Amino acid sequence: MEKIRAAITGINAWAPEYRLTNQELSKLVDTSDEWIMQRVGIKERRIQKGEGLGSSDMGEQAVKGLLAKTNTSPDEVDLLICSTVTPDMMFPATANIISDKCGILNAFSFDLNAACSGFLFALQTAAAYVETGRYKKVVVVGADKMSSITDYTDRTTCPLFGDAAGAVLLEPTTEEFGIMDYIFRTDGSGRKFLHMKAGGSVRPSSHETVDAKEHYIYQEGQSVFKFAVSNMADVAAEIMERNNLKSEDIAWLVPHQANLRIIDATGRRMGLDPGKVMINIQNYGNTTTATIPLCMWEYENRLKKGDIIILAAFGGGFTWGSIYLKWAYDPQ
Ligand code: UT7
């Protein structure tokens, strides 16, 4: 029997209109455009404004656009997986809500949380379903409203994050395209450096937790930086080696967009020409599970059938990993 692979056959993303610039941030906290550009590489990030809106609303926009663009009826979707660290609610799953809002009724759906590596873990999970031969159209969506857990009085975290969603359609192919290999790792002992202190079962929400600002991102930036640089670069180099890929074979690196210095270090370790590294951190900041689809969507018209692409991410958990894929279609 021919091997079935899972190929990305469409991509879409959505970000809110409001742009929070470094200039505006410097009125909220003691920071500057110069510091943020030098240390992180972000100029502005998008913020979802408006009462009653959450990650599912951004996911809805990304998925509806994806279905329209790929001429897919909601009834044809077999499975939808949403990766998020900012679900609409503790339960039900944001994937269930996005499916409802998009009219995806003949499918099951669930959330997957692997922080900034969530999109990669969700993509590979979806691919495993497709490779069984039973699932023909699977949607993977990364959606995060990071502004809902960002403390805009904390200068060490508030410049970093933004809101967005990105989605891809995965379909089976027997050709040599699609997801070829992956390497994923987790190390839960890294949780002390990056987490949200309250609101879970260990420390449920209370007046005390709200007063202590424990519902925001807590990050020890320098420690996370060290692990991110070494692990993201190592895993990207490892997947190249395992698949006998030379730097000249690779068309694009799509790195998680947390810090330009981490992105540059990964590209250098892989021996890549800087022009082969997708970067849009300057316009969106770190949108957690949306960074990778948002980046690929912005570069979609430059991708050609057969392009060898490496995806790489590192994030809370710690979680990290890399996917090697061959792009399945030419620009429309
Ligand atoms: O996607 C999830 C995974 N997360 C990451 O990958 C993030 C990894 N970490 C980072 O990207 C970086 O560590 C940060 C961008 C968070 C911070 O950059 P850094 O170069 O590690 O800065 P630092 O924390 O060592 O701080 C250097 C100085 C400190 O001042 P002193 O102690 O040297 O006087 C900070 O207080 O910069 C100060 N500082 C700021 N100054 C102006 C910290 N934040 C700011 C700010 N504006 N926003």
Image (cartoon, grey):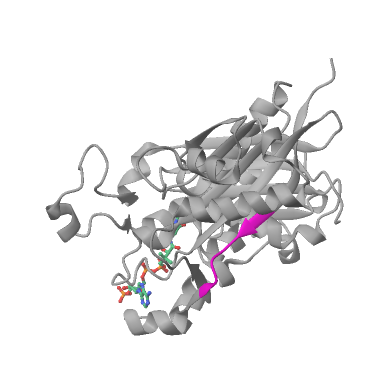
Residue 54, above or below 20: above
Residue 154 is covered by the magenta coloring: no
Q: Is residue 99 left or right of residue 328?
A: left
Q: Please provide percent x and percent y for residue 258.
A: 51, 60
Using the image, determine if residue 73 lies above or below residue 257: above
Q: Residue 78's image quarter?
A: top right
Q: Quadrant of the C terminus?
A: bottom right
Q: Quadrant of the N terminus?
A: top right
User: Which stretch did the figure color magenta?
Assistant: 12-18
Picture residue at 62% right of the left edge, 35% below the top: 124
Residue 243 appears anywhere in the view: no
* Residue under the point 40% across and 42% down: 317
Residue 194 in sight from this viewpoint:
yes
Magenta stretch holds residue 15: yes
Q: Image height check: is 234 above or below 108?
A: below
Please tell me in which quarter of the rendered image ligand 1 is found: bottom left
In the image, taking residue 90 as reference, residue 54 lies left or right, namely right
**Residue at the location (20% across, 47% down)?**
205
Q: Residue at x 46, y 43 (%)?
A: 94
